[in-house]
Amino acid sequence: MEKNIYDLVIVGAGISGSCIARELSKLDIKIAILDKENDVSCGSSKANSGIVHAGYDPLPGTLMARLNVEGSALMKKYSKVLDFSYKEIGSLVLSFDENGNQKINELLERGRVNGVKNLSVLSKKEVLELEPNISDQVECALFAPSAAIISPYQATWAFTESAVINGVEFFRNTMLHSIKKENDIFYLDTSRGILKTKFLVNASGLDAGHISSMAGAKKYLILQRRGEYSLLDSSVSSLVNHVLFQTPTALGKGILVTKTVDNNILIGPSADDLSGSDLYSTETTALKQREIMEKARISVPDIPVRALINSFSGIRAIALDLEGKPVNDFIIEEDEKVKGFINVGGICSPGLSSAPAIALYVREILEKAGLKAKEKGNFIEERKGIPELKSASIDARMEMIKKDSRFAQIICRCEMISEGEIVRAIHSPVGARDLDGVKRRCRAGMGRCQGGFCSPRVTEILSRELQIPMVEVTKKGGVSYILDSKTRESVADIGGSL
């Protein structure tokens, strides 16, 4: 028998991979999760709407429908166990004409078949009582009280961290070059050398089709669909109270307007299929930003654009067959030819909502495929996040400062983030290694000035805590360096003086 072999390797540290890692860490087996990026949640998981959907949209009988409803309930439970923000604010699908009214009734029936509880259709009067800022052209709305909002990157970090606390090894910046299977063992040629494993889970998001082909498994394509968003400052958080959808189209759930867990207002996304040189592009455009605002005003006419603080985009992974036709469901299965290889592909919306249930489903598949292991007796169920100074009571703040004086040093003024929180983010079990990693964990740089004030200080703290020169600190890993050289050295190089 081979030595130094993993029972399971998971490719991809997005929300699906992290949930799978956490679920399987309950077993007494050796597990690794690897990602090509510098951090968790650097693909589709970091830039989506953060909506935990109720489950009325997927077609009945699909994996999407089953896992959405199951996952939504589990996400609520895990938010408490793993200490990440979750707010059950409910959603409204708004109708503005007869076609919309018909679609609302279809979604109502579909949701009931899928097992979504407490769905109802509200009249115009009832909708306007709940949401006074929406258009008075609204005719009715589908109300789903179980819909919720989370921070997708904080949830991904929490699940991965729980997995690591329970013994899973996390490999960052690890490219997978090739896969070979011999004598029931997968040999993964990676940028950190050969990794050997009995079972391999492909949860690589946008790369899932490529990884599947690399293993000699099922061939399918991943269409990259980019969605742009606009983000408004928390000063206008009272604009809406629920997640507001328009009736869905073939390209998705349409333009939404929602409050985030951090009390910003999020608007979007657009839907643009990428090809050629646009692949993996997350640039935003003035044209799409105007389009988003125009469509959003159908729902909320008076959007305060003066409060716009950022725009960003994310890419969704849409599974296609080899003829280019949409699969219209998640691909979650052990491959028919390559035994022990589990595909978790095409995890587009409602993938975030479904992720905890996807993990349970993958565990079932692995056990049927021959993964035999007993439950750990020392599994650590709970995980604690970073104490938040901003939301703490005065007494709690004083106690935090008493234990660690760095909590008294405010680094990000917009969000009132302390040095203590940033240091905790860097030294947590799955710690931040760059500016974006700090931002995702504790929101330093996410406020009105978007890091204009705090980025130099965060760079300095990263340099100090990671014990690296400041010129090696990056925005998001790779070669995204914040600084080039010392100012005085640069001036001296060109013969100047200070």
Image (spheres, rainbow, N blue to C red):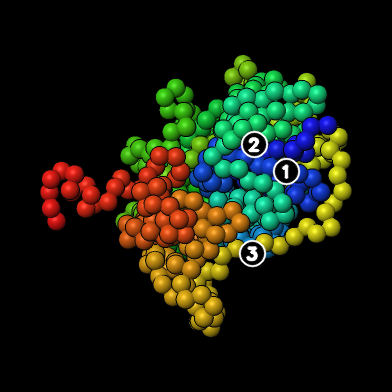
Is residue 232 placed above or below 99 in the rendered structure?
A: below
Side of 446 where 75 appears, left or right: right
Query: Can you say which quadrant of the picture contains the C terminus?
Result: bottom left
Please tell me how crowded label 3 is: few (under 14), some (14-19), or many (20+) other residues with Cα within 10 Å.
few
Residue 275 visible in the displayed image: yes
Label located before the other in sequence (3 or 2): 2
Q: Is residue 301 left or right of residue 51?
A: left
**Residue beneath label 3, please?**
384
x 32%, y 61%: residue: 453
* Residue highlighted by disc 2: 11
Residue 402 drawn at (x, y percent): 51, 81
**Could you tell me the amino acid type at mark 1?**
Ile
Name the N-terminal-most of marks 2 and 1: 2
Residue 461 placement: quadrant:
bottom left
Left or right: where does residue 427 sit relative to residue 487?
right
Q: Position of residue 324 (x, y in %)?
A: 59, 19
Looking at the rendered structure, which numbered label has been put on residue 238?
A: none
Element class at badge 1: strand
Label 1 environment density (alpha carbons within 10 Å; few <14, some 14–19, many ≥20): many
Q: What's the residue type where badge 3 is placed?
A: Lys
Q: Which comes sooner in the sequence, label 1 or label 3?
A: 1
Q: Quadrant of residue 495?
A: top left
Instruction: Identify the residue at image location x=35%, y=48%.
Output: 471
Query: Residue tagged by mark 1?
Result: 31
Camera-side residue of 60 and 338: 338
Residue placed most toward the observer, 264 or 436: 436
Q: Is residue 45 among the parts visible in the rendering? A: no
